[in-house]
Image (tube, rainbow, N blue to C red):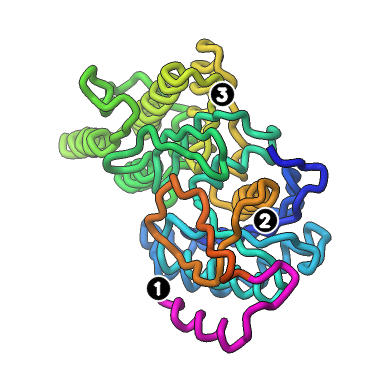
């Protein structure tokens, strides 16, 4: 473990989907978490439109960075590094963040760290509950991901144990909300309505929970179809759909499977900590059931506050700070967005000879200009 007495000051940029996030951390202390969301611009389409998201990031970037610096009370020149989500995510949206990070890193003479979005979701918990135990089991659930990950070192070793084979949990929430005509995004409204419904009113299926099914993989497509058909049958019969009961029963089916598999993974791997992150980790029933099952199993549960569960720059800065503290290799100017960056690649290190010293400008402006042109659409 690195010596953290002189903790790094790092700015992180997150643009993997529809939120422009800029965070600043000092070691494991959060100084600023500025977010500009474009969710309202996507609502009328019923989902995120990549081109709209990319344009929104472009328009919000500079102002969000300036707001984060002001909130943190620091100057850009005082930073020890700049971290950015290099993937996975929407290619165009990621490219805006990566390009901005390169520009700021080069202009300031600071090292650049392209980091993994999923690993960042795990690392953000350090900002609230202190350093991650090693190993840590992580359940990440969002609109694009449902994953069980085992990390012995958040900067270099994250091993996938299981993932969704079709719809992610958050995607299922959005689709059922659409069928129920509740708008977008679906997670918060279903969570709210479910509190007034009966989670046992309707016996919806639990995907991939049979004895021959993959122990740690998830599937929510069959559940989504079952709920949609149940609603359609009610409407076809001219009956009123009990929206609150549907919401509660659907939500219970999702969180039952998520928590059951996560606790099983902890037991099987001999890990006594479970961290839950991602946007769906803000769901109140998921938190309550996870707490109940972890307590029963003797597992310590770590869940960041809701604002740190959704996509944000603080999580990227947190992982970037850990990269600096543990002397991981910085990225170089060849860094590009990778929409399918595997979680096993926690960051994208570069070739040392291609990256300037943090406080020097080893590249000529012409060389960087040519590199930027070559990589702009890569």
- State the residue at coordinates (43%, 55%): 88
Residue 327: image x %, image y %?
66, 50
Foreground mark, 1 or 2, reads 1
Q: Which residue is mark 3?
A: 273
Residue 53, given in percent of the width and then of the height, sits at 46, 66
Task: Say above or below: 260 vs 234.
Answer: above
Q: Quadrant for residue 198, please give it.
A: top left
Residue labelled with disc 1: 378
Q: Is residue 201 left or right of residue 349?
A: left
Judging by the rendered image, the residue that carries numbered circle 2 is 23
Compare marks 3 and 1 and give the one earlier in the sequence: 3
Is residue 285 found inside the magenta-colored segment of the image? no
Res 29 label: none
Quadrant in the picture for the C terminus: bottom left
Nearest to the eye among marks 3 and 1: give it.
Answer: 1
Picture coordinates of residue 343, whole percent (x, y): 44, 46
Contact (Cβ within 8 Å) of mark 1 with mark 2: no
Q: Which residues are magenta?
A: 356-378
Query: Spatial distance from mark 1 to mark 2, Cα to Cα?
Result: 26 Å
Nearest to N terminus: mark 3 or mark 2: 2
359 part of magenta stretch: yes
Determine the residue positioned at 65% across, 74% down.
106
In primary-sequence order, the first of circles 1 and 2 is 2
Along the line of sight, the residue nearer the viewer: 325 or 275: 325
Judged by depth in the image, the label closer to the viewer, 3 or 2, is 3
């Amino acid at each position: 473990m690195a010596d953290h007495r002189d903790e790094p000051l790092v700015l992180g940029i997150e643009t993997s989907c529809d939120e422009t996030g800029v965070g600043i951390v000092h070691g494991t202390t959060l100084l600023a978490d500025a977010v500009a969301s474009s969710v309202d611009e996507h609502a009328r389409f019923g989902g995120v439109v990549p081109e709209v998201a990319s344009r929104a990031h472009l328009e919000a970037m500079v102002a969000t960075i300036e707001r984060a610096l002001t909130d943190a009370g620091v100057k850009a020149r005082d930073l020890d590094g700049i971290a950015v989500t290099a993937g996975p995510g929407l290619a165009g949206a990621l490219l805006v963040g990566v390009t901005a990070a390169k520009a700021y890193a080069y202009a300031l003479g600071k090292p650049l760290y392209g980091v993994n979005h999923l690993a960042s979701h795990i690392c953000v918990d350090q900002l609230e509950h202190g350093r991650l135990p090693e190993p840590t089991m992580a359940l990440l659930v969002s609109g694009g991901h449902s994953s069980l990950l085992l990390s012995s070192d958040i900067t270099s070793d994250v091993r996938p144990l299981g993932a969704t084979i079709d719809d992610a949990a958050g995607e299922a929430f959005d689709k059922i909300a659409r069928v129920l005509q509740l708008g977008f995004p679906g997670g918060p409204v279903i969570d709210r309505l479910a509190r007034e419904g009966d989670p046992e009113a309707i016996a919806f299926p639990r995907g991939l929970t049979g004895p021959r099914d993959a122990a740690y993989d998830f599937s929510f497509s069959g559940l989504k179809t079952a709920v949609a058909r149940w609603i359609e049958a009610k409407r076809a019969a001219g009956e009123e759909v009990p929206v609150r009961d549907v919401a509660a029963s659907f939500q219970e089916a999702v969180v039952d499977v998520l928590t059951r598999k996560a606790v099983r993974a902890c037991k099987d791997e001999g890990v006594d900590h479970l961290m839950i992150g991602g946007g769906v980790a803000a769901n109140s029933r998921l938190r309550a059931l996870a707490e109940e099952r972890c307590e029963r199993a003797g597992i310590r549960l770590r869940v960041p506050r809701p604002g740190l569960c959704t996509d944000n720059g603080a999580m990227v800065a947190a992982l970037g700070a850990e990269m600096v503290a543990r002397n991981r290799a910085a990225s170089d100017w060849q860094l590009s967005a990778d929409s399918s960056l595997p979680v096993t690649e926690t960051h994208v290190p570069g070739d040392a000879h291609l990256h300037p010293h943090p406080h020097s400008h080893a590249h000529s402006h012409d060389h960087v200009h040519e590199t930027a042109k070559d990589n702009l659409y890569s």
